[in-house]
Image (cartoon, rainbow, N blue to C red):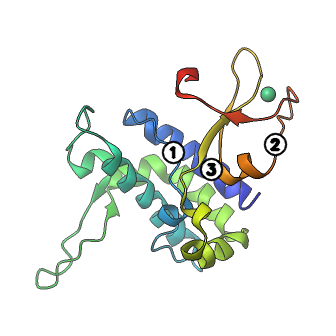
Amino acid sequence: MAALDTLKILCVSWQSIRTCYDLTHDLPGWDCLLSGVDLSCPEDAAYTILINLLTEAMELTDRFSPWYKAPAEVFGLYQPLKNLSTPCYKWELTPNALARWRPTLDMLARAIATDPELADIQATVEATDWLKDAFVSATCACKPNPPVVMIPPHILLESILFCDVCGQPLHRLEQSET
Ligand SMILES: [Zn+2]
């Protein structure tokens, strides 16, 4: 499976983002994650990926959510006015968000630095439909607390992954199981 270490960190990050903002959505697909990301600089890449996750979270809040139309700062984002004549709408992390996500950014940067597959994924994402799909929540038969992992949807279709602990195949997590 491509980019496993990076993906694990992204899954954990997305879990905490969606818990924080009452979201149930699966991890956004690679085209969202890697949008505008410069993989040649892992620190910058980690920063941009986290911003992609947070802007996605902001967009996914619906009108029944207490976070609907909350200011961007609530999501740890702001748009600096670098130059008033040519306004820049690029998002940045607020100082609070930078402090809160520092360990994640460091872990992510380390994973990106040693992950050659990410460049392949980024190069082929436009032409490969499954790379655009949101990840799928899957679980196994572990009791009493089966783990929830997010995996690319084609993995569920093409092959069967087994849990190391209970030995059962991973299956798609239905909403009723959450
Ligand atoms: Zn299991």
Q: Is mark 3 within 8 Å of ligand 1?
A: no
Q: Residue at x 81, y 42 (%)?
A: 161
Label 3 sits on residue: 9
Q: Determine crowd level at label 3: few under 14, some 14-19, many 20+ residues with C-alpha closer than 10 A.
A: some
Label 1 sits on residue: 14
Quote the CA–CA distance across marks 1 and 3: 9 Å
- Quadrant observed for ligand 1 in the rendered image: top right
Question: Does residue 138 appear in this view?
Answer: yes
Q: Quadrant of residue 111?
A: bottom right
The N terminus lies in quadrant: bottom right
Residue at far top of view: 144
> What amino acid is labelled 1 in the image?
Trp
> What amino acid is labelled 2 in the image?
Leu
Q: Is residue 57 left or right of residue 101?
A: left
> What amino acid is labelled 3 in the image?
Ile
Q: Which numbered circle lies on residue 46? A: none
Q: Tell me residue 14's x, y (percent).
A: 51, 45
Q: Would you place residue 121 above or below residue 67 in this image? A: below
The C terminus lies in quadrant: top right
Q: Secondary structure at mark 2?
A: loop
Label 2 sits on residue: 161
Q: Is residue 65 left or right of residue 106?
A: left
Of labels 2 and 3, the one closer to you: 2
Sequence-wise, the earlier of marks 2 and 3 is 3
Q: Determine crowd level at label 2: few under 14, some 14-19, many 20+ residues with C-alpha closer than 10 A.
A: some
Of labels 2 and 1, the one closer to you: 2
